[in-house]
Amino acid sequence: MSGAAGACETSAAGAARRPALVIVGAGPRGTGILERIAANAPELWGGSPLDIHLVDPYPPGGGRIWRRDQSPLLWMNSQAQDVTMFTDETVEVAGPVLPGPTLHEWAGRDGRDFAGRREQSGYLRWVYEKAVAALPPGAVVHHHRRRALRVTGAPDTRQEVWLEGAETPLAADLVVLAQGHLDAEPDDSEAALAAYAESNRLVYLPPDFTADSDLSRLAPGETVLVRGFGLAFVDLMVLLTEGRGGRYEGERYLPSGKEPVLYVGSRRGVPYHSKIGYDWTGERPPLPRYLGAAEVDELLARPGGIDFRRDVWPLIDKELGFAHYHRLFTAHPDRTRVSWTDFDEKYEACAPGSPELDALVTSAVPDPADRLDLAALDRPLAGVRHTSHDALQEALRAHIAADLARRHDPEHSPDHAVFLGLLSVYGQLTRLGDTGTWWHGFFSLLASGPPGPRLRQLLALSRAGVVRFLGADVQVTAEAGVFRAHSPTLPGQVTEARALVEARLPQPTLARTRDPLLSALHAEGAASTETGLLAVDPADGRVLDRTGVAHPRRFALGPHTNARGAGAFTRPRTNSPTFRQNDATARAVLDFLGAAR
């Protein structure tokens, strides 16, 4: 029926009588594209017939990652007031702005709460149903609970999308690939560790979405090495402690006796910074200042391409510094020696990282704690050495406690300004395509950390001996029938274990993806970037071949592409690059279908 979701399977012959769009992936990204199609249809489509096929074995709205069927102990990583699927007046789109409720408005709860994943799943399902209901008369949505295996068809003909278990393909005028986070085949190192574990009866859990990992293989009381200290580790920590019957009483953790002992380390050796725990007040830094549209235009126009560290990072450094010092001088002038106008004029004339800039900051900002040091933030344990395991535990607990205190104290509101600067930078960098893995890790360190309560739980688990810290630059070897971990933070000490967990998501590379459709596209000539992402036209998401030519009937958006935004949903009032991409793709889809019609 018109504007409604059905569960029917549609044959290629039947679909040929109506214009058809196939969206592979019915999670939040696919849902966001559907919302923008509905928003733009009154202008670009009207009430003509249209079949929209959503292909995903998981329920529409949440998809796999945000499905309801996962532990109620798992939270979102953002406050409920900071989660929306709807455009607002800050979003620069050609289509109509159609505001809608944030997660906390929809749920009727405190905006500062961290909602559970199940509640977010309900919100996404509601957004999906609202988008379907908003489609014009004549548009019908069909959900196929199957995997898409392959897409075929020449650029000037209708496409055929082959589904697992279906005898005939779906015929489509256009295909949008919105699969989201992907599983991956192991790289050489991971494959070697897995083979060693199998031959020595050890446990090795490769990179994975933590809720899908088989954690039952980790025995109570067993020593477990964990590589990764980001959000995947937080989920692992929760599922292996509270998930096994442990509980918290104030600042104490009371074990159930079923927990393994987690020895965690990573490149940085510390967890991501806590989410900011206070609201913004007063004047916002006028962003962008040093990395805006004009600067990105200039970078894109450079002959011979650009190098991120050489060409882009200095602009990011300058932009984040501007955000930090603007807030310090305007909100905390008693901690500075000169006026903001004087500092701003001199700051503009200084090159990032230059001796002149260091001298300016030193003379104008007396307290080193008020100065922005991005290198120290990136590698807080660089050069740090401890002489005992206990000393390392005390030092890391002190580091986490200090971070919690600072991120919940508005006297350190320049940190919040840097967060706003990071959002601004991320929105600009989407036009540059693949900026490499380091930048995304740095952004996540400062902007995508865990809720403060999770870090308080981590401190309690550390004091209880359930979680123990390994340090930075952790190296793991497989020898003598066990896994061994060591870190230069604790010279000369080695931790042995019969279990190793890679606490991180797989890298979304075309060469190693387990998604059969994307793997086939890559084999047939779709281009990948230097780090293995699917190459697309940043203007509208059309898939590029290895000669740089865009396929007119195939689009792709999401973390597996070089047009990935900061997330399929986002904070309100941030001119979300994800929403801008969704709108551009939806309008390109409707324009193409309209012209063909």
Image (tube, rainbow, N blue to C red):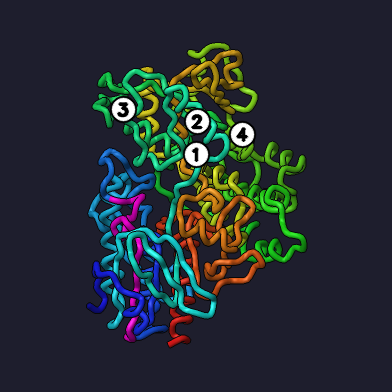
Q: Residues within 10 Å of mark 4 (few under 14, many from 20)?
A: few
Q: Is mark 1 on a helix, strand or loop?
A: helix
Return the disc, 1 or 2, that comes first in the chain's sequence.
2
Instruction: Please name whichever residue, 73 or 513, is drawn nearer the observer in this view of the structure.
Output: 513
- Disc 4/disc 1 C-alpha distance (Å): 17 Å
Q: Name the residue under label 4.
A: 376
Instruction: Please name whichever residue, 455 or 487, is drawn nearer the observer in this view of the structure.
Output: 487
Return the disc, 3 or 2, that comes first in the chain's sequence.
2
Question: Residue type at mark 3?
Answer: Thr
Which one is closest to the eye, mark 4 or mark 1? 4
Asked whether residue 481 is in view, the answer is: yes
Q: Mark 1 points at which residue?
A: 412
Q: Is the Cβ of the residue at disc 4 closer than 8 Å to that at disc 3?
A: no
Return the disc, 4 or 2, that comes first in the chain's sequence.
2
Q: Going 38% across and 77% down the picture, which residue do you hit?
A: 20
Q: What element carries label 2?
A: helix
Question: Residue type at mark 1?
Answer: His
Which one is closest to the eye, mark 3 or mark 2? 2
Q: Is mark 3 on a helix, strand or loop?
A: loop
- Disc 3/disc 1 C-alpha distance (Å): 32 Å
Residue 195 numbered mark, or none: 2
- Disc 4/disc 2 C-alpha distance (Å): 38 Å
Question: Residue type at mark 2?
Answer: Ala
Return the disc, 3 or 1, that comes first in the chain's sequence.
3
Does the segment drawn in magenta span residue 48? Answer: yes
